[in-house]
Amino acid sequence: MKKFLSIIAITAAFAVLMASCSSKSKSAEVGPITDTTGFAEFQAYKAWQDQQSNVPVATTTSNTNYRRSGASSAKTTTMSSSTTNTANVSKKKGWSKAAKYGVIGGGGGAVIGAVVNKRNRVAGGVIGGIVGGGLGYLIGRHKDKQEGRY
């Protein structure tokens, strides 16, 4: 029985290792790169700003109010400006790899835990599901970080 369990454990570990490794190049997996940080918009703004700095600026009059009270005089200047910037952020669709791998690892771990623990299959399934889900989540989160989703 001990030999059988060790063979199953080694086979499962090898299957997880082979499933997590892929021979595909990273450029083939990743689709078109989207600008989520707004760097392209910033570069366009800097180019516009450089262009505007070369153009002579016309002088404008500002709103000034003079008020006298008693013996002293004070100058009050009122200025206001408003800008509206909207960012176009593409929303990622579907499940993250962390969620997918967590669910798959939880299900696989529950099945393996129930098969391995002959005395109490429910406890083995629960423990296996928790361990498998946690490991699947960690592997999926690592893949999400590599792709820039996280």
Image (cartoon, rainbow, N blue to C red):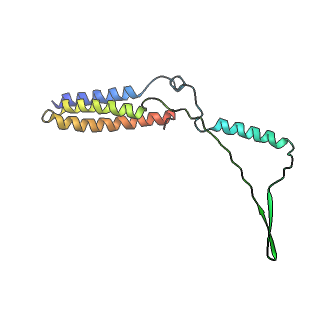
Classify residue 14 by image quadrant: top left
Q: Position of residue 75 (x, y in %)?
A: 80, 66
User: Closest to the observer: 3 or 12?
Assistant: 12
Task: Tell me: 19 left or right of 8.
Answer: right
Q: Position of residue 2 (x, y in %)?
A: 17, 32
Q: Position of residue 46 (x, y in %)?
A: 73, 40
The residue drawn where x is 86% and y is 46% is 58
Task: Tell me: 40 left or right of 135.
Answer: right
The residue drawn where x is 28% and y is 26% is 11
Classify residue 10 by image quadrant: top left
Residue at the outermost bottom position: 71
Quadrant showing the N terminus: top left
Q: Position of residue 13 (x, y in %)?
A: 31, 30
**Vertical arrangement, residue 22 with respect to residue 57, above or below:** above
User: Closest to the observer: 131 or 51?
Assistant: 51
User: Closest to the observer: 53 or 1?
Assistant: 53
Classify residue 115 by image quadrant: top left
The residue drawn where x is 48% and y is 22% is 24
The residue drawn where x is 70% and y is 38% is 43
Count of residue discs: 0
Task: Tell me: 72 left or right of 97.
Answer: right
**Vertical arrangement, residue 43 with respect to residue 20, above or below:** below
Task: Tell me: 15 left or right of 3.
Answer: right
